[in-house]
Image (tube, rainbow, N blue to C red):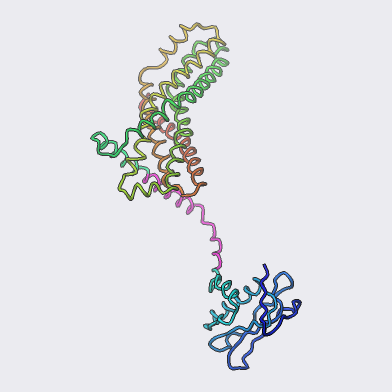
Amino acid sequence: MVLTEIPASHGAAASDTPPDWRMDASKGVSCLVLSGSWLSHDATLPQFSGDIASVGASLTCDTRNVSNWDTGLIAFLWDVRRACDESGKVFDIGSLPHPMQQLLNLLPDRAAPALPTRSKKLPFLERVGIRSIAILAEIGIVAGLAGRTCLAAYRSLFGKAGLRRSDLLSDLYNAGPSALVIVGVVNFLVGAILAFVGAVQLQKFAAGIYVASLVGIATVREMAAVMTAIIMAGRTGGAYAARISTMQGNEEIDALKVFGISVSSYLILPAVLSLVFTMPFLYLYGCLIGMLGGYIVAISMLDITSLGYFHQTIIAFGIGQFIFGFIKSIVFGAFIGLTSCRIGLKAGRSAADVGIAATHAVVIGIVGVIALDALFAIIANSVGI
């Protein structure tokens, strides 16, 4: 947009007059005299290079000979004002037309500071140390969150934790019955794959009956608990992180804190309890479905009877394997619930942060479950399970 300022007493100057400026101190007052057409798209505008130190305490402007102007003139005047500010002079804009004053006042007195240069890359050991300290600090925060959640669970036994039964029942349904289909499908396919791989190898040695032992031990000891936990990390853990991060963006978490409502009791406790309660039952369900998948593949590929398959499955493992899987599933459920809620609480407040929080919850949940399972394997080997 081009703004035109033509004083009535002077008449219209030629619109094609090139822009020009000069310093005038003939009347004892330093004045910046501007003339011509100051349109940035018509020609290259002159740059201000005057000696501000030689002017008086203040500098005024005379724009009576300016025919046309746009933001190019405002940029020039801004350079003048910044030069005066650096030299301790006063740039008086009172004589400028009102539109010029309005546009010039929208600009800051000083230019924005230059962005800091990128710092040098830290040494490898220093970066490892910083990252390790950050991970340890985050583990400490999650441990503190777990402690507050356990305290809230203890207080809930006496009805003093602020836990709403409707929230707990809703989370139990979402983490339990709603997940039966996906847990069943995945564990069935895993059991079928184990049976297929075992049958291809064992039938070479006329030991096809041991497919039942392979599927039973692998399912009860490892696969049912791990696969169920991975499914819940992707399905339920991501949902918890997205829900809490959305509440964070809507300032609902801040409202709870203002009203004195404990976030651990109101939000985190139902989520963690729902996973701790449902994971053992989903583990048992996954074991049965996984062994069913192995049974169907073994019966269809090998010359064994149903009675022989079930007998070999029963004698392959004892009750201790189920107890071990039970403990793992409970730990997996508590880990997924706590880490997902923690990621949701530390998320940003934008819409994009909701998706980021859900992604981080899924990734950390899956990696954490596999790492915990490796730790359980070491413990089981140490105690002879």
Residue 275 visible (yes or no): no
* Magenta segment: 113-141
Is 132 inside the magenta-drawn segment? yes
**In front of the other: 295 or 36:** 36
Horizontally, is 290 left or right of 2 in the view?
Answer: left
Measured as percent of width and height from the top left, residue 182 is found at: 49, 25
Q: Name the residue located 58 percent from the left edge and 79 percent from the top edge.
A: 83
Q: In x, y percent, where is residue 211?
A: 50, 14
Observer-nearest of 366 and 383:
366
Name the residue located 56 percent from the left edge and 63 percent from the top edge: 117
Q: Magenta region's main secondary structure?
A: helix
Query: Taking 21 as reference, is 185 left or right?
Result: left
Point out residue 171 in the picture as x, y percentages from the top left corner.
39, 32
Classify 265 as above or below 229.
below
Horizontal relation, residue 318 to residue 30: left or right: left
On screen, residue 247 above or below 19: above
* The C terminus sits in image quarter: top left
Between 22 and 106, the residue placed more toward the observer is 106
Residue 187 appears anywhere in the view = yes
For residue 340: magenta?
no
**What x and y, as percent, mark residue 22?**
67, 85
